[in-house]
Amino acid sequence: MPSAQPVTVGVLALQGAFSEHVQLLRHAAVALKAHDSETRFDFLEIRTPQELVRCDALIIPGGESTTISLVAARSGMLEPLRDFVKVIRKPTWGTCAGLILLAESANRTKKGGQELIGGLDVRVNRNHFGRQVESFQANLDLPFLRDSVAVSGSEATRPFRSVFIRAPVVEKILPHVDGIQAGEAEREETVVAPSKQPLDKLAKKELRAEVEVLARLPGDATAIKDEEKTARAAGEEGDIIAVRQGNVFGTSFHPELTGDSRIHVWWLEQVLNALDRRKQIAS
């Protein structure tokens, strides 16, 4: 009997830390193999629409969001990426710049200066922590890792040393709307993603899922000088740095720069769960 087709996971390779993601994905696949010996993965660097079509899931890496957007537009990748995330609604993860691109709204951006893919009903604040010299590392408690089968015991609760480089945060969870985020479009220095119609019922369900806050950065770990800009100042636990909406995931920080593959392991498990949901609908 022939073996099942491998799950193809792409990493957008137009600019940024794409090779680091590929390396950690390979480590994560090895960790998963101990719990699921039948599933095989192929990891690809993605630069063309033809390569994107082959993917079951995609990572959009950290880098310069404006540059990635510009190169994607010039290379004919921007619309295929929007279709991948918002029409077909395949599993996607964006880190740092990738989170900005996946947001439905991004502020501190001149009109026409940044194109968004969209897919997450959030407004992000770009470069929230300041310039490159104000980059920092922080230990995070990531409760969602405890949902992983392959990351268990003390590994699931061990702090995750995260890297923040000119990082965004999720400033606001937006209500889902059919069409563009019109209210956001009226804000100064704010850009919004274009509207796309989901392909089928499952894509629509994933697109309209509630946004879940998966991680916050404690206020005393931030590099912000003005405490009024932190969520903690409003009585919350800290700035929002990881969110999920259906099968689309975003993080403010760079897991790919840590050498720690635990989030990649968890995310590959989420990809498999999403593919299972698609198979159940198809059958």
Image: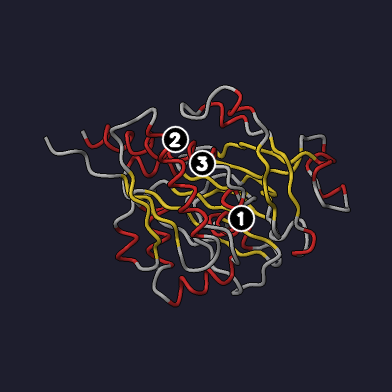
- In terms of secondary structure, where does tag 1 sit? loop
From the viewer's side, name the closer residue of 225 and 183.
Answer: 225
How far separated are the C-alphas under marks 2 and 3? 25 Å
Rendered image: mark on residue 31:
2
Against 164, is 188 above or below? below
- Mark 2 vs mark 3: give the one in front: 2
- Mark 1 vs mark 2: give the one in front: 2
How far separated are the C-alphas under marks 3 and 1? 16 Å
Against 111, is 34 above or below? above
Against 83, is 221 above or below? above
Residue 160 lies, in percent from the top left, at 65, 38
Scheme of image coloration = secondary structure
- Which residue is at the far bottom? 74
Residue 163 lies, in percent from the top left, at 68, 50
Q: Residues within 10 Å of mark 3 (few under 14, many from 20)?
A: some
Instruction: Please tell me which of labels 1 and 2 falls first in the chain.
Output: 2
Q: Residues within 10 Å of mark 1 (few under 14, many from 20)?
A: many
- In terms of secondary structure, where does tag 2 sit? helix
From the viewer's side, name the closer residue of 243 and 35.
Answer: 35
Which residue lies at the image location 62% right of the left edge and 37% below the top edge? 213
- Which residue is at the far top? 153
**Amino acid carrying mark 1 in the image:** Cys
Instruction: Please tell me which of labels 2 and 3 falls first in the chain.
Output: 2
Against 169, is 28 above or below? above
Residue named by callout 1: 96
In contact (CB < 8 Å): disc 1 and disc 2: no
In contact (CB < 8 Å): disc 2 and disc 3: no
Which residue lies at the image location 48% right of the left edge and 45% below the top edge? 248
Residue named by callout 3: 245
